[in-house]
Image: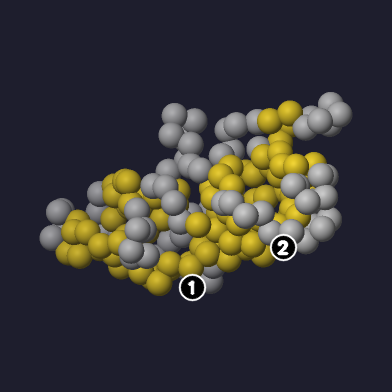
Amino acid sequence: MVKFLLKVSATLENVTDFEPIDTPESPFEYTFQIECTKCRTTHDKEIAINRFEKHEMSGSRGEASFVFRCKECKHEHSASISRTDKVLTADDSKPVPILEIDARGIDFLKFFTYGYFQAVGLETPTKFKEIEFDEGEWYDVDEKTNEQVSIVDLTWDISRS
């Protein structure tokens, strides 16, 4: 089993505690490009995993968040994901791990920023929900301070832990 960490970094202006909206009522679909470690074939479609769904692995080997059979080599692979207790704050200068991935037979190559994120005002209790990154950046105004808030320079890194 290989453990990966999905890490996030960004420049946060007047917001903090940035994270995906990921609850049982509204699960976040973590979307990746993957590669089979057996035959090194990159899967031709993006795959989405949420941490609340569980799938049976063949041979009664338990459950995983994602089960995949490679089209090329026909081997079954799996991954389980869990959130860390971390969020990206305005003070963070290094990438922060927000997701742990336990993978068997899969390399996670790239993360796609689909779905909704949330943050909190830096100086106020204003909650910003349903933040999307269609353009790669996000801007809004904190109505309590009448100041611009933004998240820019958003980068994601997948590394072995």
Q: Earlier in the sequence, mark 2 or mark 1?
A: 1
Q: Is residue 51 left or right of residue 59?
A: left
Disc 1: which residue = 93
Q: Is residue 75 left or right of residue 127?
A: right
- How is colour applied across the structure in the image? secondary structure
In what quadrant of the picture does the C terminus appear?
bottom right
Secondary structure under the numbered disc 1 in the rendered image: loop
Residue at 39 percent across and 50 percent down: it is 117
The residue that appears at 31% across and 46% down in the rendered structure is 129
What is the spatial separation of the Cα atoms under label 2 and label 1, in whole angstroms? 20 Å
Nearer-the-camera pick, 13 or 72: 72
Q: Which residue is outermost to the right?
A: 59
Secondary structure under the numbered disc 2 in the rendered image:
strand
- x, y percentage for residue 149? 25, 63
Residue at horizontal 72 percent and vertical 62 percent from the top: 160
Q: Is residue 155 visible in this depiction of the protein?
A: yes
Q: Tell me, yes or no, if residue 1 can be seen here.
A: no
Q: Position of residue 154 (x, y in %)?
A: 43, 67
Q: Which mark is residue 160?
A: 2
The residue nearer to you, when weighing 34 against 81, is: 34
Answer few, some or many: residues within 10 Å of disc 2's Cα (few below 14, many 20 plus, some between 14 and 19).
few
Q: Are marks 2 and 1 in contact (CB under 8 Å)?
A: no
Give above or below for 102 relative to 140: above
> Mark 2 is on which residue type?
Arg
